[in-house]
Image: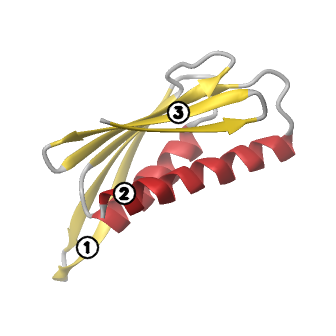
């Protein structure tokens, strides 16, 4: 298991990566109340007209009232595209009174964490 932890304001944001054969199970959590807010399953798919080319298919589950769906969707698509493996990405981050600008900063941090993961797994 690989763990990446970054500070966001006074909160720890953790990303746990578990290799399951060639596949990856990734959990992103932190803030005031870590939880499961959304889950994405991403798979590489052969293009029907040219099987030498791949595309990505992502299925999404979101707990009603949670907003992590965009995070897991983007992470799953990027990881499948760059690593060519099946991934499950789960995310639950709750930070009380977070502002719109802080949400954008948090999304940037998570994207940087994905860059670290890709770099370590390639």
| Residue 92 visible in rendering | no
**Which element type, helix, strand or loop, lies under badge 2?**
helix
User: Would you place residue 45 above or below residue 1 in this image?
Assistant: below
Helix, strand or loop at label 1? It is strand
Residue 62 shows up from this direction: yes
Going 51% across and 54% down the picture, which residue do you hit?
74
Using the image, tell me which numbered label, if any, was put on residue 89: none
Quadrant housing residue 88: top left
Pick whichever of labels 1 and 3 is earlier in the sequence: 3
**What residue sits 65% from the left and 49% below the top?**
109
The percent coordinates of residue 1 (x first, y second) are: 29, 35
> Which residue does the image show at 36% across and 67% down from the upper left?
82
Residue at mark 2: 120
Q: CA distance from mark 2 to mark 1?
A: 22 Å
**Circle 3 is placed at which residue position?**
14
At label 1, counting other C-alpha atoms closer than 10 Å, the crowd grade (few under 14, some 14-19, many 20 or more) is some
User: Which quadrant would the C terminus be assigned to in this image?
Assistant: bottom left
- Between 20 and 36, the one lying in front of the other is 20
Most foreground residue, 12 or 34: 12
Q: CA distance from mark 1 to mark 3?
A: 30 Å
Q: Earlier in the sequence, mark 3 or mark 2?
A: 3
Between label 2 and label 1, give the one nearer the viewer: 2
Q: Nearer the viewer, residue 43 or 82?
A: 82
Q: What is the distance, in whole Å, between disc 3 and disc 2 at their CAs?
A: 16 Å
């Amino acid at each position: 298991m690989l763990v990446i932890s970054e500070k966001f304001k006074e909160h720890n944001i953790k990303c746990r990566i578990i290799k399951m054969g060639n596949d990856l199970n990734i959990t992103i959590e932190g803030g005031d109340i870590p939880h499961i807010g959304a889950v994405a399953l991403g798979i590489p798919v052969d293009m029907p007209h040219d099987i030498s080319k791949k595309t990505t298919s992502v299925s999404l589950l979101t707990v009603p009232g949670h907003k992590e769906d965009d995070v897991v969707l983007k992470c799953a698509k990027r990881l499948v595209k760059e690593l060519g493996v099946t991934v499950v990405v789960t995310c639950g981050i709750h930070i009380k009174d977070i502002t719109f600008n802080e949400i954008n900063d948090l999304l940037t941090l998570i994207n940087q964490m994905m860059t670290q993961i890709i770099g370590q797994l390639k």
